Image (cartoon, rainbow, N blue to C red):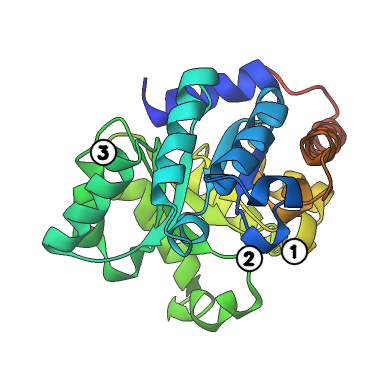
Amino acid sequence: MTFVSMLSSAWQRADSLLCVGLDPDPKRIPAGLRARPDPIFEFCRAIVDATADLVCAFKPQIAYFAAQGAEDQLEALITHIHARHPGIPVVLDAKRGDIGSTAEQYAREAFERFQADAVTLNPYLGQDSLEPYLQWTDRGVILLCRTSNPGGADLQSLEVAPGERLYERVARLACERWNPHGQTALVVGATVPQELAQVRRIVGDMPLLVPGIGAQGGDIDATVQAGRRADGRGMMVSSSRAILYAGDGDDFADAARQAALDTRDALRAAVRRSSGTSPRG
């Protein structure tokens, strides 16, 4: 099954736009897990098992694992997701960007070593930096377009042609030249709803990964209104810290589930308000 078909099935099955980001900060892992040999895996596994029926995707951020020398725990986590929760796509948040043989190795890392269904990439180096990933015709490439951080406008909003901003050029290239197998998606932040709406106009029904709600303060109603497709789907709205650290005691997984449930329901309600109907399957 391809990334996009898996994502489409997950949207329908879970009736959810929520993507849970897995950014495990060792300092915030509950004390009861810290003495274990694999505390990062156990923390994330518990979050995954508690929220799997509420999400359309999981998004582990590789830096949080690699900084602790815990890449083996990341491998084990993705293996666990695929085995216990089949059909939920895993997006490896790596934001890679390089050319030639180096890009080929990054692609192998994402798709062979970690068995991710999709990977986030920085498209700044152009098409040849994306080609090694596009050779994996069933996997997703998710390109940074208009990011949620305040500094994103420094470059992404520059005018590169009359009436065209850089993020708009990236969106057009993504749907016109960088999507040969229909497995390309874009990252657009919830903190910039006007730009999100513009990207949706440019790319049609292309999937969008939308970070920035929760701890970053993106408004759910504005995000859904700007980024949803006509069918109420089309987005992986990512929340990480607000869900992972909803509780800090032994009941952390239960607290994470409640936070995920509240976020999923808020997204569902926003879809209904924006469309006047329930989202279609």
Q: Secondary structure at mark 3?
A: helix
SS of the residue at dot 1? helix
Picture quadrant of residue 194: bottom right
Residue bearing the label numbered 1: 216
Q: Is residue 170 above or below residue 61?
A: below
Horizontal side, residue 213 vs residue 89: left or right: right
Instruction: Give the answer, above or below, for where 162 lies relative to 182.
Output: below
- What's the mark number on residue 145? none
Identify the residue shown where x is 77% and y is 60%. Answer: 215
Instruction: Please state if 101 lies on the left or on the right of 159 as rendered.
Output: left
Residue 125: percent from the left, percent from the top?
27, 69
Separation of residues labelled 3 and 2 (CA atoms): 29 Å
In this rendering, the answer to whether 106 lies above or below 233 is below
Q: Position of residue 241 (x, y in %)?
A: 72, 55
For badge 1, the amino acid type reads: Gln
| Residue closer to the observer: 31 or 276 | 31
* Amino acid type, label 3: Glu
Q: Residue at x 41, y 64 (%)?
A: 169
Disc ID at residue 112: 3
Residue contact between numbered discs 3 and 1, judged by CB atoms under 8 Å: no
Image point 87% across, 35% down: which residue? 273
Q: Residue at x 39, y 45 (%)?
A: 72
Q: Earlier in the sequence, mark 3 or mark 2?
A: 3
Number of other residues with Cα within 10 Å of mark 3, as a class: few under 14, some 14 to 19, many 20 or more: few
| Number of residue marks | 3
Q: Earlier in the sequence, mark 3 or mark 1?
A: 3
What is the secondary structure assignment of the residue under circle 2? Answer: loop
Give the residue at mark 2.
Answer: 148
- Of marks 3 and 1, the one in the foreground: 3
Name the residue nearer the viewer: 116 or 177: 116
Image quarter hosting the N terminus: top left
